[in-house]
Amino acid sequence: MYIKKIEPHNQGGLLDEVEGVIQGHRDGHGYLVRDDGEPDIYLPPNEMRAVLHRDRVKARIVRHDRRGRAEGRVVEIVERPAQPIIGRLLHESGVWLVAPEDKRYGQDVLIPKGATGLAKTGQVVVVELTEPPSLYGQPVGRVKEVLGEIDDPGMEIEIAVRKYGVPHEFSEACIAQARSLPDKVRAQDRKHRVDLTDVPLVTIDGEDARDFDDAVYCEPAKVGRAKGWRLLVAIADVSHYVETGSAIDVDAYDRATSVYFPRRVIPMLPEKLSNGLCSLNPEVERLCMVCDMLVTASGEVHAYQFYPAVMWSHARLTYTEVAAVLANTRGPEATRRKDLLPHLLHLHDVYRALLKARATRGAVDFETTETQIVCDENGRIEQIVPRVRNDAHRLIEEAMLAANVCSADFIQQAGHPGLFRVHEGPTPEKSELLRAYLKAMGVGLTITEDPKPGEFQRIAEATKERPDAQQIHTMLLRSMQQAIYTPINSGHFGLAFEAYTHFTSPIRRYPDLLVHRVIKAILGGERYQLPALPTPGEAHEKLARRLAARVAAPTHKPRKTAAPPTREVQAWEAAGLHCSANERRADEASRDVEAWLKCKYMRDHLGEEYAGVVTAATSFGIFVTLDAMYVEGLVHITELGGEYFKFDEARQELRGERTGIRYAIGTRLRVQVSRVDLDGRKIDFRLVREGDDPVARAVREKTGASRDEGKPSKVSDRRAAKKAAQKTPHSPLVAAKAAARKEAAKKAATKTKGRKPRR
């Protein structure tokens, strides 16, 4: 890489110290992820010797390359988080060491002879550092915990929860408090609640669901003089049992969300609550918070109210079962549920009305394929299957959306602080990239400078019949930002709501639990006070920085005329940041486990060929997802044939400069599984060519040659090449080089005359 040094007289302030967090790379170098949000600073391997992945450091920019990318030098280690390192214990040349499972650490950890504990060679262990790395020495540690053998069932989950710092053990105080809770609803719990036990509320979830947050009921109702429905969404009243600041609450806040893995869940709440006392299990009394809505024929919520209630779930239904009932009201499923059939049909009617309102609103609705990993008893993948969304899924989704919108409106009208679920529109940079892409692809529609959700939906609708629809919809989706939790409401772009929050899953999401507490406080004429949480400028600044390193801070800024945020709002901002960061943490841990399982699965299929589709194009290759297995892998650019490929950012494709051959999102290919890297969670594919190189095939097609003419022999190829070379006039430079070679050969022959051969 070409490096330009910065001379002292031309520093321009670039030698100032910059603080940030180290992000290691498996190849030995690293990057400083800056706190100020500026582009990362490259750290060469020699700068990574004395630091570790995730260390907080100060660095100084010392030079830039020709593209303007900064290279830095570490000048100070500010903070070294006390995080364990997970890896395999090895014994090499009489030395014990642990090779980190996360290759971003870059260095093996030396283990003194007496610090291996009960661990055996090859086992997966958790290491606690006793000496940090230095310029001339490796880090030293001791074995803190033995997880087991690398092929033990569930090992990938044990590694992931520690690798990403997911809390997976409840505190003793939390467990003790959970034990003290009752097993069922008591008489005193029913006080000041509406009795809904005779209302046929039902839960509708997946076949493998264990915790039931929500139940629904619908009946026809008059809205003014017009036709409408009364829709009840009953949500488990977790806040009744989990009091602010209690031991259970402290653990729940620390987790912020349940984490879902194949065959295992790390719950936010102890099992007695998540699967028992709070779960809306069938045919038992349960406490709930109800969002009671009147919905018009056009799908608008005409009026709503919230109240605490006690309910009795009349059935535990599945999406598959309800979809079958709605598809055939005289079928066996409908006969088995004949008592509930009228209510299910009313739910379907209100769903269709809500769907109309969604279309009118212009909410973005992309149909994406979600997959489910089916494992055997040993935790190994048996198959990967698509999750099919039916009307029952969409019915529940629309009912939950309506309740969430009412919750946000209720909090906003009361002027009470709370956490909103905010999804901002695309950034100006992403908008510009999308406009260029749509123009390059010949799409007749585009987005404005200040895009609205309806613009995205119109493009999706207009292009859904095109052969490259998947490619266009993927680019629309990628142009959007991630949703976050924040007390500063700026609406939900994707759903086209002016205000939106999460109310419907308090068993598995902490923000929903906070929303329940706020709603209860408003109903009681009180003001909910958050427990002591980190606020900027106080002793918890380190935690705020650590969370900020995981997820970007909210970009929506209050008007300049607005007063500075109060300490109360700052506390809510910290809570939103914490919940957003831990939501990302849970997603990363889940993806890591799925990637591990897919890699282990594909190791058994090395050398096999599959059809697939390009799902992403980059400057270094294309990512292909297999049709049969829904597994993604990389076809490196060097595997695409004897051609120079250039990445077209506007069209998001690789294009061969000589032949014009293109690889873009949606291109169908046939690939062979060539390599699986379990440590790196990477799968490599090789392009399978139908008989010969695709570039050569493209050349023939470009010159008009037919594939059916057959291939010439190697001899005829050589003859043709020689004949063509004789006819092709050489340039002066080529002729000069040929003459020089001829003259050098003559001189060499003269020197060797008269010499005797060596013995």
Image: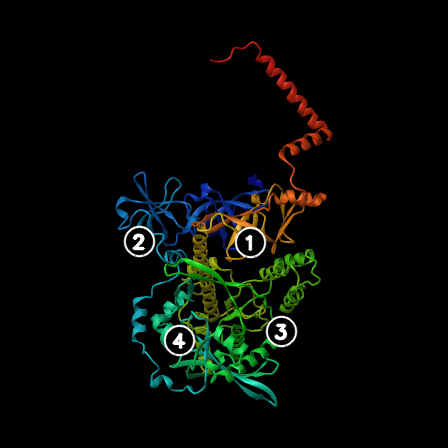
Disc with the residue nearer the chain's start (3 vs 1): 3
Marks 2/1: CA–CA distance:
41 Å
Q: Amino acid at mark 4?
A: Ser
Instruction: Find residue 369 and report its horizontal and vertical position in percent.
Output: 54, 63
User: Looking at the image, is mark 3 or mark 1 nearer the viewer?
Assistant: 1
What mark, if any, has residue 445 been given in the picture? none
* Quadrant containing the N terminus in the rendered view: top right
Q: CA distance from mark 3 to mark 4?
A: 33 Å
Of residues 345 and 434, the one drawn nearer to the viewer in this rendering? 345
Q: Earlier in the sequence, mark 2 or mark 1?
A: 2
- The residue that mark 3 highlights is 359
Residue picked out by circle 4: 279
Circle 2 packing at 10 Å, graded few (<14), some (14-19), many (20+), is some
| Horizontal and vertical percent position of residue 386 | 51, 63
User: Looking at the image, is mark 2 or mark 1 nearer the viewer?
Assistant: 1
Q: CA distance from mark 2 to mark 4?
A: 35 Å
